[in-house]
Amino acid sequence: MDVRDRIYIDGAWVPSAGRGTLEVLDSNTEEVIGTIPEGTAEDVDKAVAAAAAAFGEWSSMSHEERSKLLARVSEGLAARTDEIAETISKEVGMPLSLSKIVQVGLPTGVFSDMAKRVTEFQWERELGNSLIVREPVGVVGAITPWNYPLYQISLKVAPALAAGCTVVLKPSEIAPLNAFALAEILHDVGFPPGVFNLVTGVGNVVGEAIARHPKVDMVSFTGSTRAGKRVMTLAAETVKKVALELGGKSANIILEDADLDAAIPAGMFACYINSGQTCSALTRMIVPRSRLAEVEEKAKAAAEGFVPGSSLDPGTTLGPLASAVQRDRVRGYIEKGLSEGAKLVTGGTEPPEGLEKGYFVRPTVFSDVTPDMTIAQEEIFGPVLAILPYDTEEEAIAIANNSIYGLSGGVWSRDKAHAEQVARRIRTGQVDINGGAFNPAAPFGGYKQSGIGRERGEFGFEEFLEVKSLQR
Ligand code: NDP
């Protein structure tokens, strides 16, 4: 049992002003594995005051010193990989072997990447008679979700600190324990007091207090579009800079000439990774009607090839969902697919055999889905694929773009140049061509209601900088 009864403010572990605690559950067993303080707006006030007080010194510290501290965080995370990966696997449901690489390996890489960027970045340049100077935004409020909890934290905290900003973090109440481990590491490597602060609690209390706080200069949020809109509304009151990484309903266009033996299993993985709890998951497979039967057969085989089970069991390839709310929401969408007339290829609302306890959902595939169906429009966040047939390439592109979201996508064709042309016409922030490999330095973020701004690499770093012109 991981009992956390303190939050981290101004370089010290202190009690919350509130008395409440929140339970953290193992998604495999529904058992309590930890508790955290249920923070308050008063806690946020204290944390923001500490962050504002620390800003002057931290932002003027040499780039080399900031870089060294960030590199040590990366080492600290690497040293605790096994322990943190196990905790996240319990909280979120991702199979442990993948958690080590994705849930801890990626954040470790983000801190070392940002350590390098601080010293390599071109902070100033001449433009005519002006000197263009890049400066940190100020106090950053970071609000993060549960699906890739430490990665999403790192994508905000590491570049913000690298840029010279100070931070108040509110992690998700569903998967918060990794944030405590990160705070311990930041403390141990010697970040000055107030540079990083951690306030746990619920979104509509702690999250909203951060979003509306007059001394927070920027709020960086990842989560649902619903909560993102609320954050943006509150932040507007003090004209804060807002970065939003929100939902998606990403399309994977399989062109007529695609190699289905490669495209379908890869597409299934891109839909089911982390049990479908991925904002960039390719949840709509858009396929030529002439090849629909073939696609259905291969998708069924691939889906049934996933092994549901405990995220800690080495044989598992599909763990549970993060919470009962999430499981019920996903099962609700499966019911909706059935009632709206989609064809169930495999899966369904019943839990996988022998997995009645824990938040498990069957790997599910629907076909003959039409663009207006709920399961073609709304983010499900579970292992549910919607196959939509098309007759012409123009129609395929129109279906892909028929979404309020614009986060990610895929295109498959034996003709790579042609696939690229199609990819350019999809209105999203990323598109993977023929399963193009994950690039941690490539900018990530959304068009339309999938968000504002970019995370990762150089673009993610620059989000935390202001631009100043000095005329001489
Ligand atoms: P939320 O958007 O509610 O949660 C994300 C973060 O925002 C959490 O830290 C949450 O706090 C906080 N939050 C919630 N409400 C507010 C608010 N009013 N003001 C400020 N912060 C707030 O996601 P859910 O957990 O409810 O998931 C619901 C759906 O959202 C999922 O089914 C999925 O479709 C989508 N989602 C998308 C994600 C993405 O990466 N794009 C990530 C997570 C969810 P708290 O700790 O209380 O939850």
Image (spheres, helix red, strand yellow):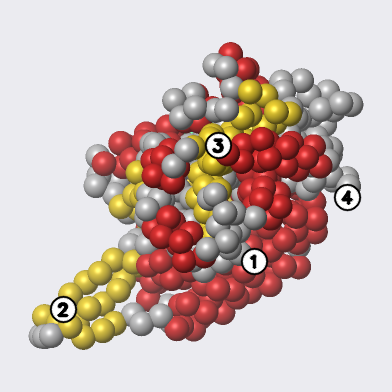
Upstream in the sequence, badge 2 or badge 1? 1
| Type of the residue with mark 4 | Pro
Upstream in the sequence, badge 1 or badge 4? 1
Q: Nearer the viewer, mark 4 or mark 2?
A: 4
Q: Pointers 1 and 4 in contact (CB under 8 A)?
A: no
Q: Nearer the viewer, mark 2 or mark 1?
A: 1
- Say if 192 sits above or below 396 in the image: below
Q: From this viewpoint, is residue 53 visible? A: no
Which secondary structure, mark 2?
strand
Q: CA distance from mark 2 to mark 1?
A: 37 Å
**Label 3 sits on residue:** 289
| Image quadrant occupied by the C terminus | bottom left
- Say if 231 sits above or below 266 in the image: above
Question: What residue is rendered at 61% in x and 41% in y?
Answer: 291
| Image quadrant occupied by the N terminus | top right
Q: CA distance from mark 4 to mark 2?
A: 58 Å
**Label 1 sits on residue:** 108
Depth check: 278 or 63 in front? 278
Which secondary structure, mark 4?
loop
Q: Residue 197 location, x and y as percent?
A: 52, 54
Upstream in the sequence, badge 3 or badge 4? 3
**Label 4 sits on residue:** 314
| Type of the residue with mark 2 | Leu
